[in-house]
Image: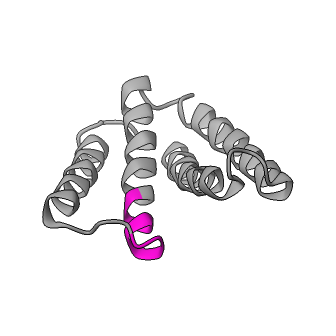
Amino acid sequence: MAWFYLILAGICEIGWAFGLKYSEGFTKLGVSVITVIVMILSFVLLSQAMKTLPLGTAYAIWTGIGAAGTAILGIVFLNEPRDLIRILCILLIVAGVVGLKVFSGSE
């Protein structure tokens, strides 16, 4: 169950990163409120995952999901640069996340 919480927490991190973009510095009330709610949910889910997963593993995977997911969605939906080196760096993050999961020895 901890891994499920951790994956959801990472997805929420992607959501609140996008929310920050669209809240325009927290000047748009509706988007800002949703962003803060998703932030809190992300932290709650991360804390639940950390009850059984090692701190370093959980935090690295949470940030990796958030970083890679946000970068990929930025490329797809926000027309951000999609050059080869950027894509290779994202793949390195994904490889690190997968490696941590595979070699964590937890649950």
- Across and down, in percent, residue 7 comes to 50, 52
- Extreme-top residue of the structure: 55
Residue closest to the eye, 99 or 33: 33
Q: Is residue 42 magenta?
A: no
Residue closest to the eye, 98 or 91: 91
The residue stretch that appears in magenta: 71-79
Q: In the image, what residue occupies the spot 19% across and 51% down?
A: 92
- Across and down, in percent, residue 14 comes to 53, 54
Q: How many marks are shown on the rendered structure?
A: 0
Q: In the image, what residue occupies the spot 46% across and 49% down?
A: 66
Q: Quadrant of the C terminus?
A: top left
- Residue 15 placement: quadrant: bottom right
Q: In the image, what residue occupies the spot 44% across and 67% down?
A: 73
Q: Is the residue 82 above or below the residue 38 in the image?
A: below
- Residue 84 placement: quadrant: bottom left
- Across and down, in percent, residue 8 comes to 57, 53
For the stretch drawn in magenta, the main secondary structure is helix
- Residue 90 placement: quadrant: bottom left
- Position of 73 with respect to 47 (left or right) is left
- Position of 98 with respect to 67 (left or right) is left
Q: In the image, what residue occupies the spot 30% across and 36% down?
A: 105
